Image: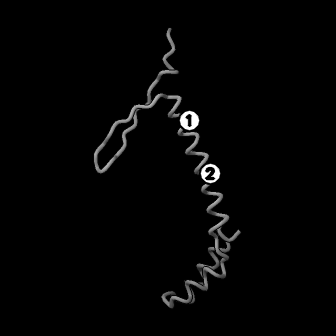
């Protein structure tokens, strides 16, 4: 049996300006793009977490300064943030 695996094409439906467009990629190219996308996603996640995260106290202070939230809400928010992965 002849192996078509190397030449197998992947069909992708992409929505472009509200229209569905079919794109054909060689399987090797698709797998390469998928691997790169996963690598960028991992980098982005770790980089974003390390650069953007404000201390919990500052987040609570910012919420409190708006004067839109009750003390009970702010206490619950602080408690939740400290328990979450955000606060660690």
| Residue lying at 61% horizontally and 46% vertically, measured from the top left | 39
Percent position of residue 57, x then y: 66, 82
Cα distance, mark 2 to mark 1? 16 Å
Answer with mark 2 or mark 1, whichever residue precedes in sequence: 1
Q: Residue furthest right?
A: 88
Up-down relation of residue 25 to residue 84 (above or below):
above
Percent position of residue 86, x then y: 65, 68
State the residue in front, 86 or 35: 35
| Residue lying at 61% horizontally and 82% vertically, measured from the top left | 60
Label 2 SS: helix
State the residue in front, 64 or 25: 25
State the residue in front, 52 or 75: 52
Label 1 SS: helix
| Residue lying at 61% horizontally and 79% vertically, measured from the top left | 59
For label 1, the crowd category at 10 Å Cα-Cα, with few meaning under 14, some 14 to 19 and many 20 or more, is few
Q: Which residue is mark 1?
A: 32
Residue 20 in the figure: left or right of residue 81: left
> Looking at the image, do the residues carrying marks 2 and 1 touch, with CB atoms under 8 Å apart?
no
**Quadrant containing the C terminus in the rendered view:** bottom right
Q: Residue furthest left?
A: 19
Up-down relation of residue 83 to residue 74 (above or below):
above
Up-down relation of residue 73 to residue 83 (above or below):
below
Q: Which residue is mark 2?
A: 42
Percent position of residue 31, x then y: 54, 34
């Amino acid at each position: 049996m002849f192996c078509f695996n190397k030449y197998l094409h992947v069909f992708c439906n992409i929505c472009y300006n509200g229209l569905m467009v079919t794109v054909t990629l060689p399987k090797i190219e698709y797998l390469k793009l998928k691997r790169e996308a996963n690598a960028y996603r991992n980098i982005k996640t770790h980089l974003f977490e390390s650069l953007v995260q404000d201390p919990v106290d500052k987040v609570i202070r910012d919420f409190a300064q708006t004067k839109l939230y009750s003390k009970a809400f702010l206490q619950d928010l602080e408690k939740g943030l400290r328990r979450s992965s955000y606060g660690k």
